[in-house]
Image: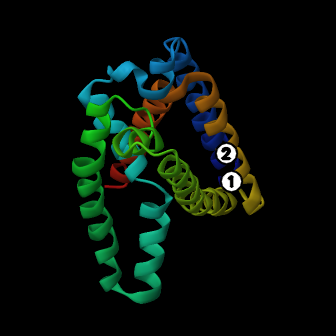
Amino acid sequence: MTAPGYSVIGVTAVFVATLAIGAYGWRFSRTTSDFFVASRTVRPGLNASAIGGEYLSAASFLGVAGLVLAFGTEMLWYPVGWTAGYLVLLVLVAAPLRRSGAYTLPDFAESRLESRGVRRLSALLVVAIGWLYLMPQFQGAGVALAASTGTGTWLGGVLVATVVLINVLFGGMRSITFVQAFQYWLKLTALLFPL
C-alpha cells in the first residue's frame, strides 16, 4: 500500500472515531444545560484534556512552525503571548461567567450590564472572532489533508466543518468535550511517538 493509502486510512479512522465519540456524548444531552454546558459536570481531568486538545490546534502545529521557518525563532513569542492571554481569559472571563450561570458571553454581558444593545454587540463580536478563528483552522485542515492524501485543499475544511457541525448539533458541549479530549490524547501520542 502507498503512503497516501495509509494516510487515507488514518484520516478515515480519526473521522469515524470522532463521530463515534460525539454520538456517545449525544446519549447524555437531554436538557438545555446538558447541551450548552454539559450540565457543569465535566471532571477536571477530562476538561483539561479538552482544553489541551483545543490548544494543540492547527495554529500550534502549522502556524507557529511556519512562522519560525519564515521569520526565525523570534516568532516563538507568539505561543507565549497567546498562552498568557488564555490564562487571563480563564481568570477574568471564564470564572465570572461560570458563577453567573449564563451560557454565553452575550448572555453574561446582558445580565451584567442590563443592556440588549451590549448583548447584540457581544453576539456580533463572538461571531466575528469565531469566524476569524475558524477560517485558518479550516485552511490548516485542508493543507494537512492535501499534504497527506493528495486531495484538494478545500476538502479538509469541508470535512472538518461537517464533523464538527454534526457533533455540535447532536451532542452539544458534552460531545465536543469528549471529542476534544480524544484529540488531545491523539495529538500528544502523535507528538511523542517519533521520540
Inter-mark Cα distance, 1 to 2: 6 Å
Q: Which mark is residue 161?
A: 2
Residue 2 appears in the figure: no
Residue count near mark 1 (Cα–Cα under 10 Å), binned few <14, some 14–19, many ≥20: many
Of the pair 192 and 64, the residue shown nearer to us = 64
Residue 67 in the figure: left or right of residue 162 = left
Do the CB atoms of the residues marked 1 and 2 lie less than 8 Å apart?
yes
Residue 42: % across, % down: 33, 24
Q: Is residue 179 above or below residue 150?
A: above
Q: Specify the quadrant of the image occupied by residue 37.
A: top left
**Depicted 161 relative to depicted 37: above or below:** below
Asked if residue 69 is positioned above or below residue 178 in the image, the reply reads below
Q: What kind of residue is marked 1?
A: Gly
Amino acid at circle 2: Ala
Instruction: Give the camera-side residue of 68 and 176.
Output: 176
Residue 157 image label: 1
The front one of 30 and 69 is 30
Residue 93 position within the rendered picture, expressed as x and y whole percent measured from the top left = 30, 48
Residue occupying the point 26% across, 48% down: 90
- In the rendered image, the residue lying farthest to the bottom is 71
Secondary structure beneath dot 2 equals helix
Q: Which mark is residue 65?
A: none
Residue at figure coordinates x 42%, y 88% from the top left: 71
Where 27 sits versus 160, above or below?
above
